[in-house]
């Protein structure tokens, strides 16, 4: 087992190198704005732009730029400096990470707590009115675009512009350590919006997984043993049905930690997704590369955790 | 029948049906049987005969499938069909236990075997976990699993097929049931292991004075163990008798077919097996009259119009058969078959008119004149 984990980690490192190389190449090849020009601002003339190019190191051969970048990254964890603001990319990422963490983990908790019970109850009462209603609602929330849902929710409930002024509006995010109450209240709407689509998906997946599980022979055996129905459903049914859900959960959280761009933009939350979006508009390569690498890191780690967790949850997988 | 008074299990006119998209499936259509304390009943039939559904109904395991069940299932005098879910639950795994066909799919894949047995014990007995675990090891020993203290921590997929089935039997016996229902307990195992499991069941039955219902498609399986045998076809019992009577003097053409299709060790090697032609009827639309007549080599035209009831065989106490042929005629047919004649030869020898229906071949052969 340890050999397996070590191999997966090494493979993950290789993958990170490949991703950073690919990101580098993509952003040099794709036709985007010239970062030097953007940095130079409105009063730019070609001389200033050229000077900026040199200072940013953009005049060097691509290979050199790449080599310098990779060396800095893997030897010193130096992600470079923003072309636009000159700030250290690493410090920018660390500044923004807590907001993304708050958003993602809060939403993840909500969507599990809402989606799974609905899925379980729907599976046990198939074709009842409750089942049809919740699966119908799930379909709506799966289809609704996040930014649309976010804008609707702000329009309805935001303290500054909403019809029913309950929750703080966009841009009111405060850090957990600086203002806990504001942190909590400002995140409620974003949590709900981000969780809505996922809760819908997880309810549907839980429902179909449990329906399939409850048709298995070992459920019949559990009943034949005289176990109470609740134990049959929860300990025998849900336990077996939940394994695929936990694996997609780890992957979903991994992806979201790379930045929930749409929700962060609509609600003006200073997270990694927002950082990435702003960097793209400024063609700020170092930040783009930094956020992509961070997202890749989260996903790779999530993948490895999923593999380990699956072997732990399902003993049949262990010896392969 | 019963010398000791009230039989342990008495099933009366059991009918089980399911509504499906294609129509009403009458899986069990009027089945009655009895079993005494410590006795063994074999229920034999092809797939689709309703034998498994009948067995599941005893424990009420068809309730969750939306089955409509009617009739009476009396266990120690109480009608199980009238019991509440809670009362039925306290019987299951306790006084009545069940063993299923495929232990790999019937045991939970994510829990250790010992834990599953402990669960079964603690569902009905208020004992501490440690005590239950010790009992689980004892049970594994009882069913002949070597090194039980280590095996108790195994997952089902880590055990061989035979050991898994033994573990399932151990789980079923943990609360010393009065009745064990075994639904095809050996079908998923290879032949040598089958024999071991059957020997195990017989030994356990003697040691625990337990009644056993053995459901199987294989007459060979019930040959040694069963005292009484009920042969099921198309949701009904077509013949019910003691094991001696079934193997020595069977009365129903379907039973003859089953007996003749058993391969024997001492037959000539090139001898072809004699299957029963055709396949079981659809449970949604059974054939009119006698349900076996389309496959019966001795069927007569009127058999498509009259449905035979299960009736006692004259001169044979305890034997009942549902067949429209005359008893004398049946005896002559069976003697001929036993001497090695084919059904056609036996038919001719017994003086029957050539079959115009039956043998499942009416589509293959040109229609004959009815007499």
Image (cartoon, coloured by chain):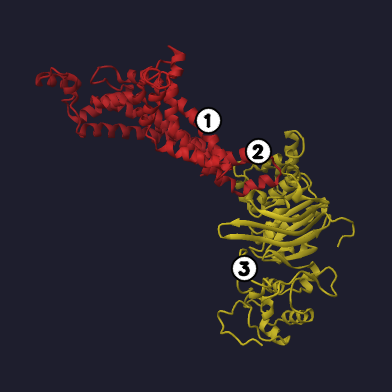
- Judge whether residue A244 can be spotted in this image: no
Residue B140 percent coordinates (x, y): 72, 46
Task: Say yes or no: labels 1 and 2 on the same chain.
Answer: yes
Where B55 falls versus A111 (above or below)? below
Q: Which mark is residue B296?
A: none
Do the residues under discs 1 and 3 have CB atoms within 8 angstroms? no
Reading the image, the residue beneath label 1 is A113
Q: Is residue A117 left or right of residue B116?
A: left
Q: Is residue A84 left or right of residue B273?
A: left
Do the residues under discs 1 and 2 have CB atoms within 8 angstroms? no
Most foreground residue, A78 or A49: A49
What residue lies at 79% left-to-right and 74% top-to-bottom?
B249
Q: CA distance from mark 1 to mark 3?
A: 50 Å
Q: Regarding mark 2 in the picture, which secondary structure is present there?
A: helix
Task: Say yes or no: labels 1 and 3 on the same chain.
Answer: no
Reading the image, the residue beneath label 3 is B281
Q: Is residue B355 left or right of residue B244?
A: left
Disc tally is 3
Where B173 falls versus A194 (above or below)? below
The chain to which mark 1 is attached is A
What residue lies at 66% left-to-right and 64% top-to-bottom?
B49
Q: Regarding mark 3 in the picture, which secondary structure is present there?
A: loop
Residue A52 percent coordinates (x, y): 16, 19
Identify by letter the chain in yellow. B
Residue A186 percent coordinates (x, y): 42, 19
What residue lies at 51% left-to-right and 42% top-to-bottom?
A132
Q: CA distance from mark 1 to mark 2?
A: 20 Å
Q: Which mark is residue A231?
A: 2
Q: Is residue B317 left or right of residue A106?
A: right
């Amino acid at each position: 087992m340890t050999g397996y984990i070590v191999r997966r980690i090494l493979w993950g490192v290789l993958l990170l190198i490949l991703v950073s190389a690919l990101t580098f190449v993509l952003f040099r090849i794709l036709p985007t704005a010239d970062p030097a020009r953007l940095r130079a601002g409105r009063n730019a003339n070609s001389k200033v732009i050229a000077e900026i190019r040199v200072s940013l190191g953009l005049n060097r051969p691509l290979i050199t730029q790449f080599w310098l970048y990779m060396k800095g990254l893997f030897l010193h964890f130096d992600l470079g400096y923003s072309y636009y603001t000159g700030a250290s990319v690493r410090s920018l990422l660390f500044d923004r990470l807590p907001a993304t963490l708050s958003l993602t983990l809060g939403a993840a908790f909500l969507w599990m707590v809402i989606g799974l019970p609905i899925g379980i109850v729907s599976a046990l009462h198939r074709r009842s009115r409750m089942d049809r209603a919740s699966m119908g609602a799930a379909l709506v929330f799966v289809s609704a675009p996040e930014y649309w849902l976010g804008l609707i929710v702000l329009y309805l409930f935001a303290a500054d512009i909403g019809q029913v002024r309950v929750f703080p509006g966009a841009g009111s995010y405060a850090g957990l350590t600086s203002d806990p109450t504001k942190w909590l209240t400002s995140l409620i709407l974003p949590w709900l919006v981000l969780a809505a689509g996922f809760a819908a998906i997880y309810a549907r997946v839980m429902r179909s997984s449990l329906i399939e599980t409850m048709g298995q022979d070992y459920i019949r055996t559990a009943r034949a043993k005289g176990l109470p129905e609740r134990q049959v459903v929860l300990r025998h049914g849900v336990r077996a049905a939940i394994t695929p859900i936990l694996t997609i959960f780890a992957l979903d959280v991994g992806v979201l930690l790379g930045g929930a761009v749409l929700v962060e933009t609509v609600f003006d939350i200073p997270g990694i997704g927002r950082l990435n979006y702003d960097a793209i508009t400024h063609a700020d390569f170092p930040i783009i590369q930094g956020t992509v690498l961070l997202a890749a890191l989260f996903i790779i780690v999530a993948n490895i955790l999923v593999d380990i967790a699956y072997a732990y949850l399902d003993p049949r997988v262990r010896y392969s | 029948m019963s010398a000791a008074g009230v039989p342990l299990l008495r099933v009366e006119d059991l009918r089980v049906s399911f509504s499906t998209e294609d129509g009403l499936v009458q899986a069990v259509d009027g089945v009655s049987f009895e079993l005494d304390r410590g006795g063994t009943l074999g229920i034999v039939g092809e797939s689709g005969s309703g034998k498994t559904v009948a067995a599941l109904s005893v424990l009420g395991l068809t309730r969750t499938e939306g089955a409509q069940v009617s009739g009476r299932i009396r266990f120690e005098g109480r009608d199980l069909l009238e019991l509440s879910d809670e009362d039925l639950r306290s019987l299951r795994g306790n006084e009545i236990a069940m063993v299923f066909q495929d232990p790999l799919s019937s045991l939970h894949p994510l829990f250790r075997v010992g834990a599953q047995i402990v669960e079964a014990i603690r569902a009905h007995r208020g004992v501490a976990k440690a005590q239950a675990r010790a009992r689980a090891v004892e049970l594994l020993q009882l069913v002949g699993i070597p090194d039980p203290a280590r095996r108790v921590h195994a997952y089902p997929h880590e055990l061989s097929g035979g050991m898994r089935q033994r573990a399932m039997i151990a789980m079923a016996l943990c609360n010393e049931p009065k009745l064990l229902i075994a639904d095809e307990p050996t079908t998923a195992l290879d032949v040598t292991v089958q024999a071991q499991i059957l020997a195990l069941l017989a030994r356990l039955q003697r040691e625990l004075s337990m009644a056993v219902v053995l459901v199987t498609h294989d007459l060979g399986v019930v040959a040694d163990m069963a005292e009484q045998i009920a042969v099921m076809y198309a949701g009904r019992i077509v013949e019910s008798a003691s094991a001696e009577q079934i193997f020595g003097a069977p009365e129903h053409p379907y039973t003859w077919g089953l007996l003749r299709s058993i391969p024997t060790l001492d037959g000539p090697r090139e001898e072809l097996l004699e299957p029963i032609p055709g396949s079981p009827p659809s449970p949604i639309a059974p054939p009119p009259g006698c349900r076996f007549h389309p496959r019966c080599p001795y069927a007569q035209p009127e058999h498509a119009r009259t449905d035979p009831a299960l009736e006692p065989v004259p001169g044979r106490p305890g034997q009942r058969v549902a067949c429209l042929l005359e008893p004398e005629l049946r005896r002559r047919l069976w003697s001929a078959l036993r001497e090695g004649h084919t059904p056609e030869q036996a038919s001719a020898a017994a003086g029957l008119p050539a079959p115009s229906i039956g043998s499942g071949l009416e589509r293959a052969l040109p229609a004959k004149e009815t007499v």
